[in-house]
Image: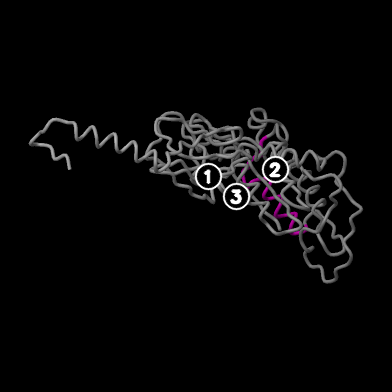
């Protein structure tokens, strides 16, 4: 499977990396939480894909004359490239994952003067076989990346103005992130091929490219870090007769007038057991190490004694024609 994203990436108001969408909103230069695709959601969606090989191409952090301005004002919103930690975590969503980003983490992806971005133009050319040799009738994902690395660099030097390069950086280097031990695989048929052979796996991108090989243990650690505490909520004050909602695929547990919804079962969130009772005038904390205590009512005998005291107080009250003691 080949997935391609072109847009902006940046951190939200709750410090989670997001890929922006058409309806993303900004506040003080940061993405409003919930108005884009957050890193935990992206990981969940990729983990759910039943594919053995996946190439994810991310063309984010745009800069150029036509750069969109999401937040208004005179300063273009360039965003942030996919962080290394996020790329490492994405590799742990399944087998055979390869991430290709349009630039390194300290660079921007130039739009360029054409109808599509420089990176996208190089990608479409490469998938057509331009500048590539067939390997048994296929286009190798490693060869596609090598083409992207050199083609994008050359196009930036030729097609991006000196003023823009002085402002945002002189170069743009697409980066490939892959687990150590994961070799190349075919990403497309080579245009015009009529005979297919055994795909060779004895090749790798040149040393001068931006190739990152990640240890599997580090990828799994990054994945756990990305999901740890995702969606935590802390609320103080009265939440009587209210709803608290966090995450997606929510399961509802109701106690009295108060409803809490959480990702999955509310009785187990992030390894912590949460019990819900009367929360009027109290605080609720949802997430790791959070605690909420149930306020249990008495047994039937205790209730009978309490009501007997109430009835006795009513009976002892002086007669009042405006009050019916019954």
Asked if labels 2 and 3 touch by Cβ distance under 8 angstroms, the answer is no
Mark closer to the chain start, 2 or 1: 2
Depicted 212 relative to depicted 55: above or below: above
Q: Nearer the viewer, residue 297 or 90?
A: 297
Which of 258/234 is in front? 258
Q: Earlier in the sequence, mark 1 or mark 3?
A: 3
Q: What distance separates the C-alpha of mark 2 from that of mark 1?
A: 36 Å
Please name the residue that numbered disc 1 is placed on: 262
In the picture of the structure, the residue carrying the numbered disc 3 is 115
Q: Which residue is mark 2?
A: 102
Q: Quadrant of the C terminus?
A: top left
- How far apart are labels 3 and 2 at the CA level? 17 Å
Q: Quadrant of residue 84?
A: top right
The x and y percentages for residue 290 are 57, 33
Please report the residue visible at 52 percent of the width from the left and 33 percent of the height from the top: 285
**Residue 207 in the image: x percent, y percent?**
87, 40
**Numbered disc 3: secondary structure:** loop
Q: Is residue 17 magenta?
A: no
Q: Position of residue 146 (x, y in %)?
A: 81, 47
Near mark 1 (Cα within 10 A), the count class, few <14, some 14-19 or many ≥20, is: many
Q: Nearer the viewer, mark 1 or mark 3?
A: 1
What secondary structure is found at the residue carrying circle 2?
Answer: loop
On the rendered structure, is 127 left or right of 287?
Answer: right
Which of the two marks, 2 or 1, is nearer to us in this view? 1
Residue shown at the point (77%, 44%) measured from the top left: 176
Residues rendered magenta in the picture: 108-129
Name which quarter of the figure residue 297 lies in. top left
Q: What residue appears at the point 59 percent right and 42 percent down from the top-left corner?
A: 269
């Amino acid at each position: 499977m080949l997935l391609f994203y072109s847009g902006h990436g940046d951190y939200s108001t709750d410090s989670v990396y997001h890929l922006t969408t058409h309806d993303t909103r900004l506040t003080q230069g940061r993405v409003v939480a919930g108005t884009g695709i957050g890193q935990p959601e992206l990981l969940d969606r990729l983990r759910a894909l039943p594919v053995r090989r996946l190439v994810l191409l991310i063309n984010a952090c745009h800069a150029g004359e036509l750069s969109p301005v999401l937040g208004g004002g005179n300063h273009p919103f360039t965003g942030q490239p996919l962080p290394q930690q996020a790329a490492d975590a994405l590799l742990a969503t399944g087998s055979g994952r390869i991430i290709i980003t349009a630039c390194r983490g300290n660079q921007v992806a130039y739009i360029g003067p054409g109808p599509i971005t420089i990176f996208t133009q190089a990608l479409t050319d490469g998938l057509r076989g331009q500048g590539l040799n067939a390997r048994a009738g296929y286009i190798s994902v490693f060869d596609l990346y090598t083409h992207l690395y050199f083609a994008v660099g050359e196009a930036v030097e030729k097609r991006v103005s000196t003023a823009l390069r002085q402002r945002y950086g002189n170069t743009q280097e697409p980066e490939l992130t892959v687990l150590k031990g994961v070799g190349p695989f075919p990403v497309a048929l080579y245009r015009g091929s009529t005979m297919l052979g055994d795909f060779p796996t004895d090749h790798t991108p040149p040393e001068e490219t931006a190739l990152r090989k990640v240890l599997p243990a580090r990828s799994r650690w990054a994945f756990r870090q990305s999901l740890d505490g995702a969606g935590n909520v802390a609320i103080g004050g009265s939440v009587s007769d209210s709803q608290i909602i966090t995450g997606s695929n929510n399961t509802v547990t109701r106690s009295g007038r108060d409803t809490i919804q959480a990702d999955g079962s509310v009785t187990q969130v992030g390894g912590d057991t949460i019990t819900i009772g009367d929360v009027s005038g109290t605080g609720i904390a949802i997430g790791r190490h959070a605690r909420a205590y149930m306020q249990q009512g008495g047994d039937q005998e205790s209730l009978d004694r309490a009501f007997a005291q109430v009835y006795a107080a009513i009976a002892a009250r002086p007669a009042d024609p405006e009050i019916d003691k019954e």
